């Protein structure tokens, strides 16, 4: 959405009277972090609405049960690496209606399921029954009721093993999975003015943006120098991912031992988007972001910055200090974080879009139809121009990476002061 001069306005959207007043003082306008927090999680916020996010878009969880089954296989690998603990936790961050946690518990082998405990972490609380449809990936499509089904009904007795909570449980052992969670952690947006001065982008309730004052020298400015080089070029925008680093580090820090995975659209320091990625979603369509509670507000994730923060917390949790040179390869050691694509991760976990042999259509037509449907769902989950392009940030805590997963991309940590001279 274009930034306007304070004297210019776009017409109000959503009928908010405050958004229609041309005399709203500039000093009273919030930045995007504050505005999105209220619009998503405040009274009447998007994520607190009865239909929930599943009424507006679907994620990998909604696309196919194959996703939950793959995560269940990953949980089994974590269980083996941990030596089969007496209680094995599965923590679903941003659980929505619990589709993933219930699907994972239902897919576990009996021996593992007997020790498993699911945690659905959701600020909106326990969900109401399903019913709405939507597709975040491009137009109205199969809602959870058609794809993954009602999670509680499908899980049956496993539903009793799910604890709903507003924050992740402390000191558990197992797998923490954050599917499209970090992209909804609100953040501020900055833009460089014609003189190359970074200014915080302020926003009216109707979504109209104006440039605020210069960004103070502080944690946000230091984060940008370290993680978003080139942000001060006139006309460019950047998204300050520092709140997401903190959120991911805090989530990783709740594990006594185990594995943390963040699955999201993301970018790396060497190729940040010049104009940012802030956008909205409503009723299955991408829309301009408007902080009035009518739409989702999301932005891609600086996964390498999150990886650095998570690695530091994981090292602290494991009782080991972390030191390094100017550029420390995060994925170099057996317990360092890795970044892989969802396509590669799911392939390693047994999900692929290979079509069944035609001979099966003759010998067992029903099995052929089922296998063909599964192949189509697998292809959607692993498509390089869609869900398969997601990054999976993999962070062990007191354990090695599960053997089944690919090694992925090594990640580098720039020095906090050295980034000041980056191009």
Image: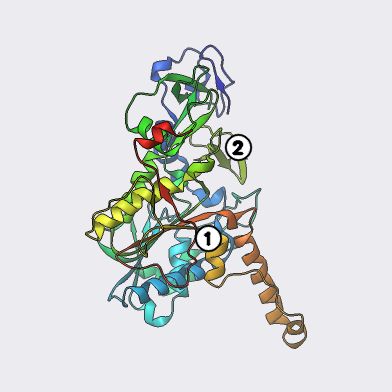
Check the image and name the residue furthest to the bottom. Answer: 363
Residue placed under numbered mark 1 in the picture = 61
Describe the element under mark 2 as helix, strand or loop.
strand
Q: Residues within 10 Å of mark 2 (few under 14, many from 20)?
A: some
Q: Nearer the viewer, residue 124 or 307?
A: 307
Side of 223 where 146 appears, left or right: right
Report helix, strand or loop for mark 1: helix
**Residue 208 left/right relative to 308:** right
Q: Name which of mark 1 and mark 2 comes first in the sequence.
A: 1
Nearer the observer, 70 or 62 = 70
Q: Residue furthest left?
A: 319
Above/below status of 310 relative to 255: above
**Residue 237 left/right relative to 111:** right
Q: Name the residue furthest front.
A: 325
Q: Image quadrant of residue 31? A: top left
Residue 288 in sight: yes
Q: Residue at x 65, y 48 (%)?
A: 138
Compared with residue 160, is residue 231 higher up or lower down, i.e. above or below? Answer: above
Residue shown at the point (62%, 69%) measured from the top left: 352
Q: How many marks?
A: 2
Q: Are marks 1 and 2 in contact (CB under 8 Å)?
A: no
Asked if 11 appears above or below 353 in the picture, the reply is: above
Would you say 421 lies left or right of 89 here? right
Q: Position of residue 220 (x, y in %)?
A: 36, 32
Question: What residue is drawn where x is 53% and y is 52%?
Answer: 54
When asked about the image quadrant of residue 217, the answer is top left
What percent of the width, then of the height, locates residue 241?
42, 39
| Structural crowding at the residue carrying mark 1, measured as other residues with C-alpha within 10 Å and reported as few (<14), some (14–19) or many (≥20) | many
Q: Position of residue 48 (x, y in %)?
A: 43, 45
- From the top left corner, tell me how far across and down residue 363 is, in percent: 74, 88
Residue placed under numbered mark 2 in the picture: 287
């Amino acid at each position: 959405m274009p930034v306007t001069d304070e004297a210019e306005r776009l017409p109000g959207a959503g009928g908010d009277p405050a958004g229609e007043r041309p005399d709203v003082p500039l000093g009273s306008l919030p930045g995007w972090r504050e505005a999105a927090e209220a619009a998503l999680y405040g009274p009447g916020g998007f994520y607190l609405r009865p239909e929930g996010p599943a009424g507006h878009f679907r994620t990998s969880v909604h696309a196919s049960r194959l996703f939950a089954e793959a995560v269940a296989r990953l949980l089994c690998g974590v269980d083996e690496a941990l030596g089969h603990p007496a209680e094995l936790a599965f923590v679903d961050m941003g659980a929505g209606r619990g589709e993933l946690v219930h699907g994972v518990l239902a897919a576990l082998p009996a021996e593992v399921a007997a020790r498993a405990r699911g945690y659905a972490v959701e600020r909106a609380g326990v969900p109401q029954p399903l019913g709405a449809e939507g597709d975040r990936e491009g137009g109205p499509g199969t809602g959870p009721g058609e794809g993954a089904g009602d999670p509680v009904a499908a899980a049956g007795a496993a539903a009793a093993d799910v604890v709903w909570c507003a924050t992740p449980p402390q000191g558990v052992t197992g797998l923490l999975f954050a599917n499209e969670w970090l992209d909804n952690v609100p953040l501020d947006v900055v833009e460089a003015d014609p003189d190359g001065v970074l200014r915080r982008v302020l926003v009216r309730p109707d979504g109209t943006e104006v440039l605020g004052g210069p960004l103070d020298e502080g944690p946000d400015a230091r984060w940008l120098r370290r993680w978003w080089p080139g942000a001060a070029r006139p006309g460019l925008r950047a998204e300050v991912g520092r709140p997401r680093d903190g959120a991911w580090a805090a989530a990783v820090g709740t594990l006594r031992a185990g594995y943390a995975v963040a699955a999201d659209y993301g970018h790396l320091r060497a190729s940040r988007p010049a104009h940012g990625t802030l956008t909205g979603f409503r009723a299955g369509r991408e829309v301009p972001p408007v902080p009035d509670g009518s739409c989702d507000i999301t932005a891609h994730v600086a996964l390498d910055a999150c990886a650095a923060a998570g690695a530091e917390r994981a090292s602290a949790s494991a009782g080991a200090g972390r030191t390094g040179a100017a550029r420390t390869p995060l994925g170099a050691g057996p317990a360092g974080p890795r970044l892989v694509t969802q396509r590669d991760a799911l392939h390693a976990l047994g999900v692929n879009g290979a079509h069944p042999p035609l001979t099966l259509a003759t010998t067992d037509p029903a099995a052929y139809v089922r296998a063909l449907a599964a192949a189509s769902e697998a292809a959607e989950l692993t498509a390089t121009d869609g869900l398969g392009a997601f990054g999976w940030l993999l962070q062990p805590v007191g354990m090695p990476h599960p053997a089944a997963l690919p090694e992925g991309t090594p990640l580098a940590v720039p020095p906090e002061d050295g980034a000041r001279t980056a191009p």
